Amino acid sequence: MTNNDIKQVPFILIDDNPLDLKISERLLLYAKLANRVTIFLSPLEALAAIRKAGKPEQATVILLDIQMPEMNGFEFLAEYHELPPEIRKRYFIFMLSSTLDDADLIRVVENHDALALLPKPLDYQALKAALIKIQNLPI
Amino acid sequence: MPNRKIRLLYIDDERHNLYAFRAAFRMDFDILLAESADEAREILVNNPIPVIIADQRMPKETGIEFFESIKNLYPYSMRILLTGYTDIQAVISAVNIGNIYRYLQKPWNEDEIRVAIRSAYEIYDSRIQLIEKQNELEKAYVELDKFVYSASHDLRSPLMSILGIIKLAKLEQDPSQTEQYFGMIEDSVHRLDEFIKNIISYYKNSRIENDITGVDLRKLVAEIVESNRYQEMATGIHFDIRVHETEPFFTDALKLNIIFSNLVSNAIKYQDPTKKDKNVYVSILVEDQVAKIEIGDNGIGIAHQEQENIFKMFFRATNHNFGSGLGLYIVKDAVTRLNGKIAVDSEVGRGTKFKIEIPSLQ
C-alpha cells in the first residue's frame, strides 16, 4: 500500500472490547495511517492520560467507541470538552461503533468535538479520506 | 364467582342499620362497617375495598359528599348509594358528582343488594385485571425497546468484530497467522452465542408459570457448584457450601437453578486475580417457611454508584469481563417470580455478597 499522500499520525483507540481494539490497531498499521497507536480499555484512563499529556506535539486522532460500561462515548466527550481549546485543537475524534441507533447518530452529528461516526469494522479508506481533508486544513 | 368472599364496606350513622346489614349478609360477603365518613376513610387507608356502600343521609357528611371525597383516591372501588328517601335530586347528584354505580332504596331488598354487590364486584375485578394486563403490556414494551437498542449494540457488535477479523485476514501476508484469526472469530462467536442463550433463558423464564415441588437445596447447590468448579476460571478458588434445612422447602426448581447458576458463575467470573486466597461461598438457612440465601465472594466487588443499576436490563458494570448485561436482570426477575427479594452488599476490592429471601410456596 502506498501512502505518499498522507502524513502518518499518532492514534488513540478507546474501546472496552479488547478484540475490537486489536482489530482496529492492526487495520491502522496495515493501512499505514498511524505512526503510533495507544490503546485504552477504559475511557476514564484515556481521559486521565490525555489530561496529563497536555498539548500533544503532533496532531492526534482518537477513535472512540460509544457503548462502554463505566463511561460511554458521549460521557467521555462531555468530560473531554472541559479541556482547554488549545489542547482540543490538536485532537481529531471519530466515533467508532457498530450502533444502528438513530439517537446515537444524531448525538454524534450534534456533538462539536466528534467529527463523524464510523461504522465497525474500521473502514480505513473512509478514515483516510476524512484525514486527507483534515490535513489540508491549516492546523 | 371467586372462592373468597367479596369484601365490602358499609357506612351508616345508625348503628342499628349496620348491625342489621351485617346480620343479613355476613354469610355472603366479607363486611367492614363504619359509623361515619371519617371512620370509613380510616378503614380505606389500610384496605383495598372493591365495593363501598354508603347511606345518603348522615349528619356530618352525606353519602354523596363522602363518595366525592374518595373517588379520586380509590378510583377502582365501586360505589353504591343507599337511601330511605326517594329524592330525585340526590339520585342526579349521586350519578353526576359521586360517580355512583348503583342507587338502592331503604328498606333494602336483600336479593337486590346481593345482585348489586356481585355485579359491582365483577366490574371492579375486570377493571383491576385490565390494569394488570396494561402494566404487563407496558413492561413488555419497555423491554422490547431495550431489546431493539441492545440488538443494535450487543448482537451486532460480535458480528462486526468477526467482519473486522475477516478484513484483517484478507490483508494478512503471513499464512501462519491464520490460526490466530480463527481463534479470534471463535471468541466472538461464543460471545454472541452466550448473549442469545441468555435472552432465550430469560424469555422462557418469564413466560412459564411456577412449577412448585419440594426442592433439595443441598443437592441443587452442590450440583451447580460442581458444574462450575472445573472450568478454567475457577482454578484456585475455594468453595464453601453450608446448607441448613430445618423443614422441607417448596419452590420452582428451575427458577431457583437459574438464580444459583448465574450468581455462582458471576462469583467465579469476577474474582480478583491479584488475590491469593480466592473464595466463593453459598450459605442457606431454611426456617419458618423462608429460605435465607447468601452467595458471596472476595472478588473485585461492585462500585457503590453502580449497585442500584446492576439489576437493570442490559446493564454492565465493568469491562473486566464480557457479560451480556442480562444475568442479574434474569436473577432479579426469577427471585420476584418466586415472591422473594434480593439485595447486594459489595465493596470494590473486598468482594460481593448477594442476600436472597424466598418463601416456601406451599
Image (tube, rainbow, N blue to C red):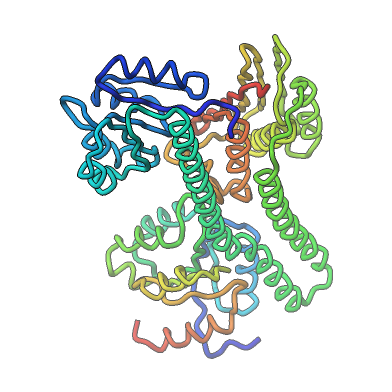
Locate residue B336: give its quadrant: top right
- In the image, taking residue B319 as reference, residue B103 lies left or right, namely left
Residue at 61% x, 63% y is: B151
Residue shown at 41% from the left, 33% from the top: B51
Determine whether B178 is above or below A4 in the image.
above
Image spot of residue B327 (x, y percent): 63, 43
The image quadrant where one finds the N terminus of chain A is: bottom right
Q: Position of residue B245 (x, y in %)?
A: 71, 12
Foreground: B310 or B51? B51
| Number of numbered labels in the structure image | 0
- Is A69 positioned to the left or the right of A89 in the image? right
Q: Note whether B21 is above or below A91 in the view shown.
A: above
Q: Report the quarter where the C terminus of chain A lies.
A: bottom left
Can see residue B249?
yes
Left or right of residue B280: residue B40: left
Q: Is residue A58 visible?
A: no
Depth order, front residue of B262/B9: B9
Q: Residue furthest top?
A: B246
Image position, residue B319 (x, y; %): 56, 49
A103 versus B94 height, above or below: below
In the image, is residue B181 above or below residue B346?
below
Residue at the left extreme?
A: B60
Give residue B205's position: percent from left, percent from top: 68, 43
